Image: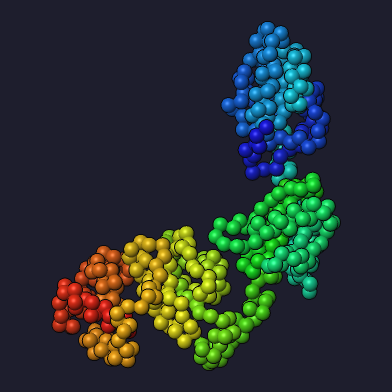
């Protein structure tokens, strides 16, 4: 039987529908299973209802489609088998005006295929049955929302206690009626609460936690499984430190996933970097910078090694602190700066930035703290090139070139002399740099600088006049490019 394409509402137990005295429904065949649920009601008089069912339905029929000689052949067996194959949950047969009783062959077929068969009395309309199903769904949905709301409030209160992590786990275990476990980055159980499941389920939950533990691109953030009759779920905590929340419950009730997700968000905050030694060190670095310490003196607090500077602009959405923070999380760094229309992120060099959907990125070469200002400039230029070429991500080239063979002091002195006529006008210098980097493309330069293409033409012409040179000459372009790279 296929899984039903269920609607976003809780299902209705068949027993609840049978308990409605106003409907007077009676089950006359099929299993008496309290776990049977209905996702919707559907009326059809087709001899083969299979193409019209999604699964999980209470199919209602008055038997109009039944031929007179159906009882002597395989008609009912074929009919019921098609309902079961489509994933139907139950069959309701309406009495009168077509049939005074439910055909015995239909009762036998439903028993054989284990499909619940309900007798619908003449005074009960199919519309009334469908309305009752939707009423029960609405009641279940309201109960689910009330349960989730109460759980959210209790979890939030637990997170504010002196021992927040154990309190949240205890509250979660109580709300879902199972076991809640916090796994550390190495896979060990750091804290737990609730009933201990069977050893098989406990081991399977630990294995499931490894599935969602961050290990690279494409790692799922949550996963579910079952073992030893226990429902299992694992949630990667969003702090990116490798913590995982595991939940084991004897049954899966509506709202469990939402409640566990709320707990996962709270635990992400409680286990985040601001609660760790790394977070404290970064706070210390910020305070020292605000008090006047140079970056090189506080860089050691941020961690060893080199760093990358990333500049990013959104492709469409409005830039706001939430979007900037989400980008930092995706790049694996909390060091995010939202400056006008650009987000700047400082990323450890061992975390190679990848293209992010909805963003255009420019990435600098790896740099030590003393070279961060230069890396910031590299990232800005890489972003401009990425926007001009409509590329998701552009990295600053870090390979040595011919220009690097000239001693730095001599090269910088020559660059200052060569570019002196335009040095006092930053707009001209940046336009010339961008235009040369894009091989003289007016349109791409305009996109990169967010100006009109005619403005680019005017600025480049002004540069040529001030420098008293021919910018169509490739040798001139090359010399100017080398000089601009030294700035």
Quarter of the image with the C terminus is bottom left
* Residue 155 shows up from this direction: yes
Left or right of 37 on screen, residue 449: left
Q: Residue at horizontal 66%, vertical 53%?
A: 223
Q: Where residue 474 sits: x, y (%)?
A: 19, 73
Q: Where residue 201 sits: x, y (%)?
A: 78, 52
Q: Where residue 372 sits: x, y (%)?
A: 45, 82
Left or right of 359 on screen, residue 462: left
Quarter of the image with the N terminus is top right
Q: Residue at horizontal 73%, vertical 58%?
A: 206
Q: Is residue 422 above or below residue 51?
A: below
* Residue 416 shows up from this direction: no
Q: Is residue 400 above or below residue 8?
A: below
Nearer to me, 383 or 439: 439
Left or right of 237 on screen, residue 448: left
Q: Residue at horizontal 59%, vertical 27%?
A: 52
């Amino acid at each position: 039987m296929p899984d039903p394409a269920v609607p976003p509402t809780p299902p209705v137990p068949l027993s609840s529908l049978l308990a409605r005295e106003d409907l007077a429904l009676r089950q006359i065949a099929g299993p008496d299973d309290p776990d049977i649920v209905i996702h919707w009601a559907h009326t059809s008089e087709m001899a083969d209802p299979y193409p019209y069912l999604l699964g999980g339905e209470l199919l209602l029929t008055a038997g109009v489609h039944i031929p007179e000689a159906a009882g002597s052949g395989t008609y009912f067996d074929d009919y019921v088998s098609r309902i079961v194959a489509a994933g139907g949950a139950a069959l309701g047969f309406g009495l009168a005006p077509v049939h005074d009783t439910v055909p015995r062959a239909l009762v036998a077929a439903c028993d054989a295929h284990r499909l619940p068969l309900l007798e619908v009395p003449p005074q009960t309309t199919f519309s009334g049955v469908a309305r009752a199903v939707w009423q029960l769904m609405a009641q279940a949905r309201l109960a689910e929302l009330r349960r989730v709301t109460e759980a959210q409030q209790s979890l939030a209160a637990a997170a504010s206690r002196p021992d927040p992590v154990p309190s949240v786990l205890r509250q979660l275990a109580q709300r879902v009626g199972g076991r809640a476990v916090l796994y550390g980055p190495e896979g060990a159980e750091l804290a737990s609460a609730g009933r201990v499941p069977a050893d098989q389920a406990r081991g399977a939950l630990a294995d499931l936690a490894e599935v969602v533990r961050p290990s690279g691109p494409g790692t799922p953030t949550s996963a579910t499984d079952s073992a030893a009759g226990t429902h299992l779920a694992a949630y990667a905590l969003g702090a990116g430190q490798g913590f995982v929340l595991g939940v084991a419950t004897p049954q899966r009730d509506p709202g469990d996933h939402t409640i566990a997700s709320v707990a996962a968000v709270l635990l992400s905050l409680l286990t985040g970097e601001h609660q760790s030694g790394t977070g404290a060190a970064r706070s210390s670095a910020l305070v020292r910078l605000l008090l006047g310490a140079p970056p090189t003196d506080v860089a050691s607090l941020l961690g060893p090694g080199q760093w990358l500077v990333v500049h990013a602009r959104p492709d469409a959405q409005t830039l706001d602190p939430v979007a900037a923070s989400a980008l930092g999380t995706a790049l694996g760094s909390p060091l995010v700066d939202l400056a006008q229309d650009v987000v700047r992120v400082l990323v450890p060099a061992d975390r190679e930035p990848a293209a992010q959907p909805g963003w255009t990125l420019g990435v600098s070469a790896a740099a030590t703290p003393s070279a961060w200002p230069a890396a910031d400039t590299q990232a800005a230029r890489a972003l401009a090139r990425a926007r001009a070429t409509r590329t998701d991500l552009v990295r600053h080239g870090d390979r040595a070139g011919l220009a690097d063979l000239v001693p730095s002091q001599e090269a910088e002195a020559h660059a200052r002399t060569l570019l002196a006529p335009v040095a006092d006008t930053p707009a001209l210098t940046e336009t010339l740099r961008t235009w040369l980097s894009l091989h003289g493309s007016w349109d791409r330069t305009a996109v990169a600088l967010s100006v009109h293409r005619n403005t680019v033409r005017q600025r480049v012409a002004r540069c040529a006049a001030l420098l008293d040179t021919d910018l169509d000459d490739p040798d001139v372009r090359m010399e100017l490019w080398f000089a601009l790279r030294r700035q």
